[in-house]
Amino acid sequence: VAAGVEDLRPMFGAADERVLVAGLVCWTHLFGAVAFELFGHRHNVVADDAYAAFFDHEMRLLGGLTGLRTFDHD
């Protein structure tokens, strides 16, 4: 996996390869989440009244992946 993120090395120097991979995964997911939101791809998939909770859970998952926040199951 590390070989796949070596192109990031000039920007992030000696960062651990796990950090590079987690960051790339999070950036990709966040980019996709924003695109899905902007183009309505979540409409009729996530209920309007539950969307805030869904988004909060989604961001907690990403935070857990990066170590910014501990993962919880609520």
Image (spheres, grey):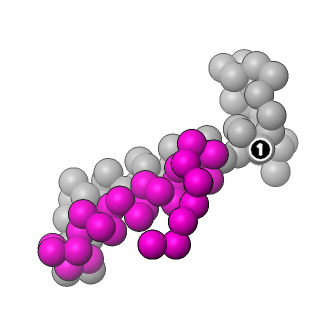
Across the whole image, how many numbered discs are drawn on residues?
Answer: 1
* Picture coordinates of residue 48, whole percent (x, y): 15, 73
Q: Magenta segment range? A: 46-74
Q: Is residue 8 above or below residue 61?
A: above
Q: Is residue 71 magenta?
A: yes
- As drawn, the residue found furthest toward the left would be 49
Look at the image and say whether residue 17 sits in the magenta stretch. no
Instruction: Give the x, y percent position of residue 31.
Output: 41, 48
Q: Is residue 53 left or right of residue 68?
A: left
Principal secondary structure, stretch drawn in magenta: helix
- Residue 49 position (above or below residue 20): below
Residue located beneath label 1 in the image:
18
Residue 43: where, in percent of width, then height?
Answer: 19, 73
Residue 65: x %, y % from top left: 62, 53
Q: Residue at x 52, y 60 (%)?
A: 61
Q: Callout 1: few (<14), some (14-19), or many (20+) C-alpha neighbours within 10 Å?
A: few
User: Which residue is more in the foreground, 73 or 50?
Assistant: 73
Q: Quadrant of residue 38?
A: bottom left
Q: Does residue 30 appear left or right of residue 10 in this picture?
A: left
Q: Is residue 66 visible?
A: yes
Residue 25 in sight in this render:
no
Q: Is residue 38 left or right of residue 31?
A: left
Q: Which of 8 and 18 lies nearest the eye of the viewer? A: 18
Q: Residue at x 69, y 29 (%)?
A: 8
Q: Residue at x 80, y 39 (%)?
A: 17
- The amino acid pointed to by label 1 is Arg
Tell me the element at label 1: helix
**What residue sits 23% from the left and 74% below the top?**
50
Quadrant of the image occupied by residue 40: bottom left
Q: Quadrant of residue 4?
A: top right
